[in-house]
Each structure stands twice: as C-alpha cells, then as structure tokens.
Amino acid sequence: MFYNDILLSVIVPCYNEDKVIRETYSRIHKVVQEHFSKYEIVFVNDGSKDDTYPILLEFARENENVVVINLSRNFGHQPAVSAGIHECRGTHAVIMDADLQDPPEVIPEMMTMLLDNNYNVVYGVREVRKGESLFKKASAYLFYRLINYLSETKLPLDTGDFRLIDRKVIDVFNRLREKQKYIRGIISWIGFSQQPFYYERDARVAGDTK
Ligand code: UDP
Ligand code: MG
C-alpha cells in the first residue's frame, strides 16, 4: 500500500542514542518513504550528552522531512514524547523508541489496520521480549497488573508507548493540561476506538537502557 492522503509524523525521543540513531533513522526513512507520500520524522533530543544532537542535525540537513526538537535539558522519556506530540503536524502520528525495540517496518500494517476499521488508536502489544532481563520482564508483568488493580483507567496489558494515533487523539492529548503525562495511560483514558496490534519486541540494537 501507498498512502497519498496522509501526513505521517514519526515521533522519536532520543537520549544519548549516538550508537544506534543512524540505523534507526535509516530504517524509519526506508519504510516511510516507501509507503507515504507525505511524512515527517520528529526527533526529540532530550538533553543528550553524546553526539546524538549533531547527528540529528545532519539528518535534518539532508532531508527536509526531518524535524529536530532540542529540549533545554534532560526531561525524561515521557516529557520528550509529549513535546513531539505537541509539535507534530501529521494527520496521524507514530510514537516509537530510538533503540529499534519497536520495529518501524510494521508501521504500514498498523496504518492499514487503523484506516480499514476506522480506529483512532492502534497500540503495540509485545508478544516476545527479546534481550530483556528476567527482572525487567517480571517487573513489567507485575506493574501492568498492579496498575489495573489500583486504577479506574484500565491500561492494556504489556503495551509500551509504541502506537499509531490519529489527529483527533493528538488534539485531545494536547489540550490536557497535565505537566507530567503518563502517555500510554492518558491515551487509553482519551477513549474513541483503540485496538491492539501484536508484534515481537526486539532487543535494543546498541547502547544502554536508560
Ligand atoms: N529516552 C529519553 N529520555 C530519557 C530516557 C530515555 O528520551 O531520559 C528515550 C530513549 O532514547 C529511547 C526511549 O526513551 O528512545 C526509551 O528508553 P530506553 O530504551 O532506555 O528504555 P527501555 O526500553 O529500557 O525501557
Ligand atoms: Mg529500550
């Protein structure tokens, strides 16, 4: 499929990702240009202390569809993603990590699923967690079940922030005034029509978990 009527924003928060960011950019770039006539890749540099920022500027120089947001300091993953959602111009946006644990190659499939069924959100659900420690797997398992026990807003189990959202959801998200947004929780709370997309979660390609 090739999409002409969509402006896709791919939002990527980056903190000290200079070991992996070139590969991330090239994999995202390959997929989006094959499937979307209009796209932007929105990198949010979250106060990186390594060479991430100069490398991002290189991408922006060679590709006018690359947008770089440079935060004033390190705010953390969630505020970095919020900044990207706030600044993106797309009719649709994908949120994904910079370390390629979320495979960009499934984006077209997620888009087809969303458009064919008139969904507003298609969220990634991890079927396999490669390269993660038993502690990380067990703590993630307990975390989602505990949150669902304590909270009225049900969180889909085993989801990260990897998801495709449409403009309706982006606009509502941006109108909420919370400063510390827990993104997957807030998006779930926003409602409309949300469906899971099952995928294999890869191991981080390079660099360390933060
Ligand atoms: N990240 C960020 N700011 C931070 C920490 C992380 O923007 O303070 C980004 C990081 O570059 C990556 C994503 O958030 O794109 C997820 O981070 P990480 O892979 O370290 O988390 P994990 O997958 O281990 O939970
Ligand atoms: Mg990661």
Image (cartoon, rainbow, N blue to C red):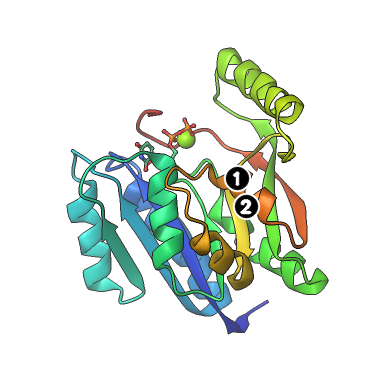
The outermost residue toward the right is: 117
Q: Quadrant of ligand 1?
A: top left
Q: Judge by depth and name the residue closer to the eye, 167 or 113.
A: 167
Q: Which mark is residue 184?
A: 1
What amino acid is at disc 2?
Ile
x then y, percent, for residue 98 = 42, 46
Q: Are marks 1 and 2 in contact (CB under 8 Å)?
A: yes
Residue under circle 2? 187
Residue 1, above or below 194: below
Residue visible at 64% across and 66% down in the picture: 108
Residue located at (21% from left, 62% from top): 58
Amino acid found under the numbered disc labelled 1 = Arg
- Under circle 2, the secondary element is helix
- In the image, residue 161 above or below residue 138: below
Q: Position of residue 207 (x, y in %)?
A: 35, 32
Horizontally, residue 127 falls left or right of residue 36, namely right
